[in-house]
Amino acid sequence: MKRAIFPGTFDPFTIGHASIVKRAITFIDELVIGIGYNENKRTMFSIEEREKTLRELYKNEPRVKVASYNDLTIDFARRMDAQFIIRGIRCVKDFEYEETIADINRKLAGIETILLFTEPELTSVSSSVVRELISFGKDVSAFLPQPDNKE
């Protein structure tokens, strides 16, 4: 079984993140969305709120699991028995950062990172922009995935 983690803060989880999940499960058997605690980031939503939102969003997709973690991503990947880390990139700056982290993760843990380029129409969507819009009371529903309410 090919298992991967998709780590991030996901504060909030956007349509860009959802696009990465949708594309990743076409070639990964199981994907664990890992909500990481990062003490350097001031978050708007608690980890519990983010977990609840993601579990609701993917309740009808058995290949997607949700978990949170507060240690190194490679340690989380080992606990989840993941062979891959999935990351989305929007621009060259993202690529340079992700390449460095991927190299370190491969050297430390032997885990490969798969980079998926964001679809062009989603490159401007970021959690930080969505948080800012929320803080000014704007409607951000167009930037957030909606649960599939099929039972």
Image (tube, rainbow, N blue to C red):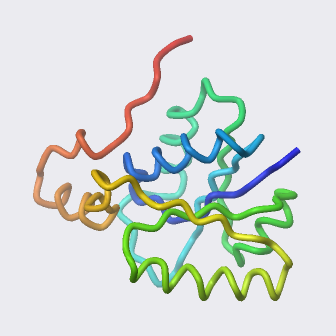
**For the point 44% across and 77% down, which residue is it?**
94
Taking 61 as reference, is 124 left or right? left
Q: Quadrant of the N terminus?
A: top right
Q: Quadrant of residue 4?
A: bottom right
Q: How many marks?
A: 0
The relative height of residue 150 versus residue 24 in the rendered view (above or below) is above
Q: Quadrant of residue 5?
A: bottom right
Q: Quadrant of the C terminus?
A: top right
**For the point 31% across and 61% down, which residue is it?**
123
**For the point 78% across and 65% down, which residue is it?**
77
The relative height of residue 41 versus residue 138 in the rendered view (above or below) is below
Taking 70 as reference, is 150 left or right? left
Taking 23 as reference, is 142 left or right? left
State the residue lying farthest toward the top. Answer: 151
Q: Position of residue 51 (x, y in %)?
A: 56, 47
**For the point 51% across and 50% down, which residue is it?**
20
Q: Position of residue 146 (x, y in %)?
A: 38, 32
Q: Quadrant of residue 60?
A: top right
